[in-house]
Amino acid sequence: MNINLTLLGQSITFGIFVWFCMRFAWPPIKAMMAERQEAIASGLRAAQDAEERLAKAASDVDEEISQAKAEAAKIIEAARTQSAQMIDEAKNAAKEEADRILESAKSDIDQEMNRARETLRRELSGLVISGAEQVLQESIDAGKHEALLEQLAGEL
């Protein structure tokens, strides 16, 4: 009977232990488990929010990069257009300057040709007068015969 009495004592002690644990130990343990469960759930929500923000930030970064690339392409195109325009303007300015220099040179050449012709006419008229003087052995008045000399110079 000792086994029965021991079994009964152990059952009563176990019942008191269970009651004591249910009454005093179980509520704080349950509260700590609830707090821990809430902390884990809060951490998971925060991680999910961070993941969503990260995805949104990545999307925003991709959009900013595409906008920056588009803007860079526009700037490059504008620079190409401006450089082409500057080259065309420089070509036009150079052509105008070349035309102006060419026209000036032609004008200078025409003036020099006219001077040379006039000089040749004077020299020729002097030679004609000199030759006529030698032929006639007398002095010819250049003032009287100037119209004749001009006609002769014009024919030459």
Image (spheres, rainbow, N blue to C red):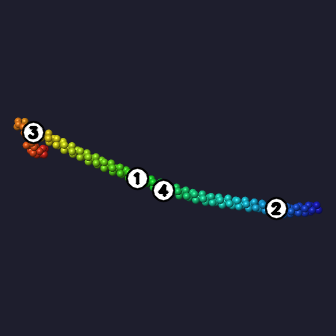
- In three-dimensional space, the C-alpha distance between marks 4 and 1, rounded to whole angstroms, equals 18 Å
Residue lying furthest right: 1
Q: Which residue is mark 2?
A: 24
Residue kind at label 1, given as amino acid type = Gln
Amino acid identity at mark 3: Ile
| Left/right of residue 140 with respect to residue 106 in the rendered view | left
Q: Nearer the viewer, mark 2 or mark 4?
A: 2
4 or 1: tag closer to the N-terminus = 4
Closer to the N terminus: mark 2 or mark 4?
Answer: 2
Question: What secondary structure is marked by label 1?
Answer: helix
Residue carrying label 3: 129
Amino acid at the residue labelled 2: Phe
Q: Can you give x and y, in whole percent of width and height, for residue 72 in the image? A: 47, 54
Q: CA distance from mark 3 to mark 4?
A: 87 Å
Give me the disc on residue 82: 1
* Whole-percent x, y for residue 121 in the image: 14, 42
From this viewpoint, which residue is outermost toward the front? 143
Mark 3 burial class by Cα count in 10 Å: few <14, some 14-19, many 20+: some
Report the Cα–Cα distance between label 2 and label 1.
86 Å
Mark 1 → mark 3, Cα distance in angstroms: 69 Å
Q: Nearer the viewer, mark 1 or mark 3?
A: 3
Disc 4 target residue? 70
